[in-house]
């Protein structure tokens, strides 16, 4: 006997599988809340763009602080590069379970497909995620291939109307697109920066130099060229968009370095406690080749950064230029 007026929370990335998971549950008359997450490493853009066609509400949860701790020492290690897939998914399901309990929802579901991702969506990984989260979880797209959950046993959902999708083929998903007349969905693509090898290297380096880094620090790793001098971070904008974001991310105590009379990179220096060179203008000779090897004393860092600022505007190499240095003194 199946119960009426059932409500479920579905983890919603905005991708096709999570869209289909919601549609499968809606077909059984289940009321759905779509739940998505934001951090330094992934955002809710796709979820916001694609939820409208489903007729459900979207709740966005900020997990920035929690994700820092998870990425430092995940219980089940890393997947691709620095992506702690199992720990991350378990954390999301755990949060979904807490919200379900607080708001009176009956169960939690995800759009995961058995075998689609060899490391994080095999049988053992799915079992580990549920165990680590401490929350029963339904996978509507592959439920018939998995052990029956308490959610099904309690009559909260009809197992016979769930699916048996397996592996990386999208054939069955394409059939469901036509069946549910889904008009808008993104192509499969990784949306997590932790799977990007370049960003993962930057993050490892930050954890090495600044083990107590904050979310505002990690955000800087997304923009420009990254250099470390004596545990001091230097970010050099590569393009206009980088410059604009560095200006927005600057905070009290940072030094901002830029060309005084020409356009070029904006440079943010964080972690330098004091310097005689601030709110000042330097004239430097820009070298044709940049040498940043060897130890640089703290009192030399801004001088070196001034030279780098000119160097990364190639047209100024082998010329004298004026460099403006400002210290941010307000929040």
Image (spheres, grey):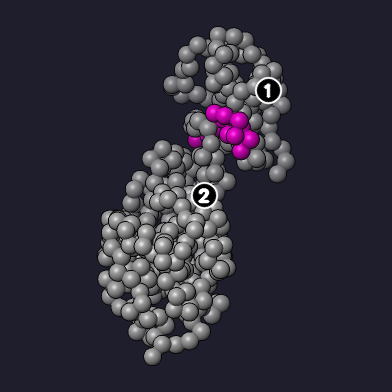
Task: Look at mark 1 in the image and give the residue it sits on.
Answer: 324
Q: Quadrant of residue 270?
A: top right
**x then y, percent, for residue 183:** 49, 58
Note whether 216 is above or below 141 in the view shown: above
Q: In which quarter of the image is residue 264?
A: top right
**Helix, strand or loop at disc 1?**
strand
**x then y, percent, for residue 162:** 35, 74
Query: In this orientation, which residue lies closer to the viewer: 303 or 239?
Result: 239
Residue occupying the point 69% across, 18% down:
261
Note whether 143 is above or below 275 in the view shown: below
Q: Can residue 240 be seen in this view?
A: yes
Graded by Cα atoms within 10 Å as few (under 14), some (14 to 19) or many (20 or more), the crowding at tag 2 reads many
Name the mark on residue 108: none
Left/right placement of residue 331 relative to residue 304 reads right
Name the mark on residue 40: 2
**Helix, strand or loop at disc 2?**
loop
Note whether 15 is above or below 213 in the view shown: below
Going from N to C along the chain, the mark reached first, 1 or 2, is 2
Q: Whole-Å distance between the Cαs marked 1 and 2?
A: 30 Å
Q: Give the range drawn in magenta.
A: 231-245
**x then y, percent, for residue 93:** 44, 67
**x then y, percent, for residue 195:** 39, 46
Query: In this orientation, which residue lies closer to the viewer: 228 or 276?
Result: 228
Query: In this orientation, which residue lies closer to the viewer: 285 or 243?
Result: 243
């Amino acid at each position: 006997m199946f119960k009426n007026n059932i409500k479920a929370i579905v983890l919603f990335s905005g991708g096709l599988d999570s869209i289909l998971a919601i549609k499968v549950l809606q077909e059984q008359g289940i009321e759905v809340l779509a739940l998505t997450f934001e951090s330094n490493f992934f955002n809710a853009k796709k979820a916001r763009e694609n939820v409208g066609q489903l007729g459900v509400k979207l709740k966005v949860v900020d997990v920035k602080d929690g994700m820092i701790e998870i990425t430092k020492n995940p219980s089940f290690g890393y997947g691709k590069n620095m992506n702690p897939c199992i720990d991350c998914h378990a954390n999301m399901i755990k949060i979904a379970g807490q919200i379900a309990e607080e708001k009176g929802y009956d169960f939690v579901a995800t759009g995961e497909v058995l075998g689609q991702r060899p490391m994080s969506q095999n049988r053992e990984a799915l079992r580990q995620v549920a165990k680590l989260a401490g929350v029963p979880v339904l996978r509507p797209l592959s439920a018939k291939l998995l052990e029956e959950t308490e959610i099904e046993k309690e009559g909260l959902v009809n197992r016979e109307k769930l699916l048996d999708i397996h592996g990386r083929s999208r054939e069955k998903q394409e059939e469901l697109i036509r069946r549910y007349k889904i008009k808008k969905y993104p192509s499969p693509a990784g949306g997590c920066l932790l799977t990007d090898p370049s960003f993962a290297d930057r993050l490892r380096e930050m954890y090495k130099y600044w083990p107590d880094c904050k979310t505002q620090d990690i955000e800087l790793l997304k923009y420009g060229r990254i250099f470390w001098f004596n545990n001091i971070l230097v970010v050099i904008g590569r393009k206009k968009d980088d410059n604009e974001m560095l200006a927005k991310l600057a905070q009290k105590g940072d030094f901002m370095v830029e060309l005084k009379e020409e356009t070029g990179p904006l440079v943010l220096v964080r972690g330098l406690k004091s310097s005689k060179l601030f709110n000042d203008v330097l004239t430097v000779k820009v070298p044709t080749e940049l040498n940043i090897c060897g130890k640089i004393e703290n009192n030399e860092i801004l001088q070196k950064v001034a030279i780098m600022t000119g160097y990364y505007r190639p047209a100024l190499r082998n010329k004298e230029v004026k460099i403006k240095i400002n210290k941010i003194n307000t929040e």
